[in-house]
């Protein structure tokens, strides 16, 4: 807390003399001048209204499509280098393991029943799973990142924030478009483009866009002569815009994307040690791996980017959707309707022991279908002193989830090595356990968001949303093979078979916001706000959601019912059914912000102080043998965010952000697993105390028809807690901080032809994003790494 106060005081002290200068400059400023950041006004729709960024009393970062292209930001994964407090990370199942975090909070862990804490929306349509938003950006108009809970306008599952992507609409008058091709290292090939056609001038317009992205992976498997974590993606989208009257328009959109990638593969970070040497199982697994022509990391070297896999590493998915947006002026009010249907399918097939030996293989089949309907009516009253908005929302979501784990030829000898009593429990390739689960979910909401002008420069915003959730889930675990009726020891990695369940859930909640903002001068605004967010409860849908059936721990059974006694293992107990339900997550958040511009609006300085307290934080933790989904209890985040931008001269801009975050689990948060130190007082997983970025942009003419441009960018983050498991010494396992440098430069001729070169992570910095306990290899750690250096050249033609 002391550091937070000192940091805030220092930033405030720097701002005090600026306020005096701003007041002086304001006397000569034209109040109608556009709010600028760089060379042009930034318009955002964070409050479902078109507003200048500097007039919005929210913590918002807006990045234009042009800026995304200049910085070579091609997906949400790359966006963290341009957005304060944003972190994205993906484990071995992109559809369900992707975590998008803002201010240290984001949903983590592999379970299809979990919804995101950071909402992801494309063209106003909510995507309920973060993995469905990982495709490449194509024909993007802007990206807005809203930090902090957004429970009024964006609804449930936005307890940490929202990422809103807006793609370009058809133009009704001009034929225009672009085509771009890129080649680079690791056999990178990327094409993207768009064409706009006015089919009936001023009446009907069409816009088509496409994207293709392919490159080799950066995790190498020399023995198999292949690579993992590659890219192989394709996207196509089309929009039709109908101008049906002076104030009535209809927009129809269709999109389809697919990927077929070898994703995602981890590397060994550290091996377990016994008396200063590798644990005995390391040499044993190395021998097993060698029998298959594979290798085992006896001496881990993670940044060689090498691994050895004995099975497939496959991830394929398809995402498609259609929507209709209607906007109609009703004489003093505007009605907006957005109807959408989406279908997302994903399949993964992975070697999940990550050892080079043939122990376990996992397959997951995930299908998601969502229909949604939103209605908004908004307008003004009392001489435009009240800007009002009312709306309703409905969604129907269906999930079909299948998961299986099959044993390999090395399961029997390996577990027999660990414990002779287990020898013979795993006849090769004859055992399989998994689950088939379905979930139907319906969500209903009513909301209102109103901005009152109390006096000149003084505004009060009030928002309220009521949400109702109805969910029903059915899970049918199975266990096939010769050992189907045998109990498992507590440490056997596939765990015991789970119990079936057929459950329903119904809940409702209020969320909302209250904001008071005051514009001291045309260029300086301050605000204070309160927001409450809500993240729906639900059901764990994974293989071990309601298990285990058997355990060596008598506490798993209230009655202490003994299943059997196994020589070498001892007494085996029949467990009570584990409740697969988890409760809703809520947050109360407070912000104090300053939005300011100085020196004839050449300099922009924005400062935000925030504090948030979470209740029943949803946490899904990998135990080394499976996943444990629970409500961890309370958590707290607080921090300071500083954003700055300077227009040095026409076409020359510099900017950056600096972020301080203090986070911890509450005193009521226990250990994830019995016998481990508690999480209480530890930092949230993935939450860096310090992070920030610097960028510059130079775009200047060198002749009447030739421009040159150059953009360096730099991102850094301090060390962070790499998971949710505390070490035996009571300390979290921290991953080192890192910094990344990016560069792009090129020339533009006649505003039509462009050639450029770029690099990302130009210094080829090696860094880890996630660490986790190695599967069935107690004491060892694996991790997923960030991208090494990527560089290439691009050609672009605009018409």
Image (tube, rainbow, N blue to C red):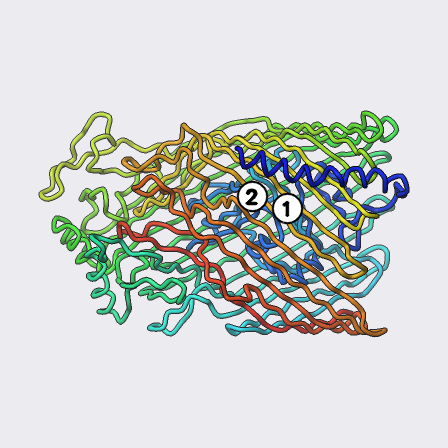
> Are circles 1 and 2 on residues that touch, CB within 8 Å?
yes
SS class, disc 1: strand
Q: Residue 763, relative to residue 642: is it above or below? A: below
The answer to which image quadrant residue 20 occupies is top right
Sequence-wise, the earlier of marks 1 and 2 is 2
Residue 682 drawn at (x, y percent): 42, 37
Mark 2 nearby-residue class (10 Å; few <14, some 14–19, many ≥20): many
List the residue tagged with mark 2.
Answer: 102
Return the residue nearer the eye: 626 or 295: 295
List the residue tagged with mark 1.
Answer: 145
Return the residue nearer the eye: 239 or 463: 463
Q: In which quadrant is the C terminus drawn?
A: bottom right
Residue 281 drawn at (x, y percent): 21, 57
Q: Determine the residue located farthest toward the left in the rendered image.
A: 567
Q: Residue at horizontal 74%, vertical 29%?
A: 450
Residue 519 drawn at (x, y percent): 79, 34
Residue 776 drawn at (x, y percent): 27, 51
């Amino acid at each position: 807390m002391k550091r937070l106060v000192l940091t805030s005081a220092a930033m405030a002290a720097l701002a005090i003399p600026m306020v005096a200068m701003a007041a002086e400059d304001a006397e000569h400023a034209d109040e109608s001048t556009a709010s600028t950041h760089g060379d042009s006004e930034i318009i955002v729709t964070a409050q479902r209204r078109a507003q200048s960024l500097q007039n919005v009393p929210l913590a918002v970062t807006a990045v234009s499509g042009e800026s995304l292209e200049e910085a070579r930001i091609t997906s949400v994964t790359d966006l963290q280098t341009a957005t304060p407090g944003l972190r994205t990370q993906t484990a071995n199942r992109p559809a369900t393991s992707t975590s998008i975090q803002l201010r240290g909070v984001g949903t983590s862990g592999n379970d299809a029943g979990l919804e995101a804490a950071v909402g992801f929306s494309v063209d106003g349509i909510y995507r309920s799973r973060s993995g469905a938003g990982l495709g490449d950006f194509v024909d993007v108009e802007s990206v807005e990142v809203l930090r902090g809970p957004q429970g009024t306008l964006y609804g449930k599952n936005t307890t940490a924030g929202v990422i809103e992507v807006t793609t370009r609409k058809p133009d009704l008058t001009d034929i225009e478009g672009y085509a771009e091709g890129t080649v680079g290292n690791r056999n990178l090939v990327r094409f993207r483009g768009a064409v706009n056609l006015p089919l009936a001038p001023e009446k009907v317009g069409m816009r088509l866009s496409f994207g293709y992205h392919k490159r080799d992976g950066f995790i190498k498997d020399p023995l198999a002569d292949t690579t993992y974590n590659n890219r192989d993606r394709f996207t196509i989208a089309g929009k039709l815009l109908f101008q049906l009257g002076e104030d009535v328009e209809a927009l129809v959109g269709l999109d389809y994307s697919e990927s077929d990638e070898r994703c995602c593969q981890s590397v060994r970070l550290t091996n377990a040690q016994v008396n200063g040497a590798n644990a005995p199982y390391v040499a044993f697994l190395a021998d097993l791996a060698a029998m298959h022509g594979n290798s085992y990391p006896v001496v881990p070297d993670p940044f060689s980017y090498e691994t050895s896999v004995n099975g497939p590493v496959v991830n394929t998915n398809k995402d498609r959707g259609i929507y209709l947006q209607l906007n109609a002026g009703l004489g003093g009010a505007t009605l907006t309707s957005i109807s959408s249907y989406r279908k997302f399918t994903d399949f993964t097939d992975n070697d999940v022991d990550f050892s080079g030996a043939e122990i376990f293989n996992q397959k997951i089949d995930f299908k998601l279908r969502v229909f949604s309907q939103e209605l908004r009516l908004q307008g003004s009253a009392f001489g435009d002193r009240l800007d009002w908005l009312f709306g309703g929302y409905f969604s129907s979501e269906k999930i079909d989830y299948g998961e299986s784990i099959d044993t390999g030829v090395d399961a029997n000898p390996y577990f027999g090595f660990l414990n002779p009593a287990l020898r013979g429990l795993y006849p090769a390739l004859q055992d399989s356990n998994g689950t088939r689960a379905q979930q139907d979910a319906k969500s209903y909401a009513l909301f209102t968001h109103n901005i009152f002008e109390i006096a000149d420069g003084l505004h009060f915003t009030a928002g309220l949303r009521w949400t109702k959730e109805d969910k029903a889930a059915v899970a049918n675990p199975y266990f096939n093979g010769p050992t189907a009726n045998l109990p498992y020891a507590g440490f056997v990695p596939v765990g015991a078979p789970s119990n079936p369940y057929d459950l329903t859930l119904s809940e409702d909640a209020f969320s909302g916001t209250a904001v008071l903002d005051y514009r001291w001068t045309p260029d300086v605004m301050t605000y204070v706000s309160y927001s409450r967010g809500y993240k729906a409860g639900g059901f764990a849908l994974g293989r071990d959601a309601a298990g285990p059936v058997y355990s060596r721990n008598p506490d798993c059974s209230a009655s202490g019912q003994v299943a059997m006694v196994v020589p070498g293992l001892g007494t085996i107990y029949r467990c009570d059914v584990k409740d697969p339900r988890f409760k809703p997550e809520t947050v109360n958040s407070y912000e104090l912000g300053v939005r300011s511009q100085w020196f004839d609006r050449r300099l922009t300085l924005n400062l935000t102080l925030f504090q948030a307290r979470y209740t029943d934080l949803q946490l899904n933790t990998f135990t080394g043998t499976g996943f444990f989904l629970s409500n961890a209890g309370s958590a707290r985040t607080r921090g300071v965010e500083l954003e700055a931008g300077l227009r040095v001269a026409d076409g020359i801009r510099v900017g950056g952000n600096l972020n301080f975050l203090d986070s911890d689990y509450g005193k009521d948060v226990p250990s994830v697993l019995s016998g481990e130190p508690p999480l209480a007082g530890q930092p949230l997983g993935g939450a860096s105390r310090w992070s920030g970025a610097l960028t510059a942009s130079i775009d200047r003419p060198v002749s009447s028809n030739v421009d040159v441009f150059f953009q360096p960018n730099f991102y850094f983050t301090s060390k962070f807690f790499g998971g949710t498991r505390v070490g035996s010494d009571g300390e979290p396992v921290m991953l080192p901080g890192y910094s990344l440098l990016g560069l792009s430069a090129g020339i533009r001729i006649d505003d039509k032809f462009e050639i450029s070169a770029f690099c990302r992570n130009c210094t080829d910095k090696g860094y880890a994003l996630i660490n986790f306990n190695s599967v069935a290899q107690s004491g060892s750690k694996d991790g997923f790494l960030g991208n090494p250096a990527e560089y290439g050249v691009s050609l672009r033609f605009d018409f």
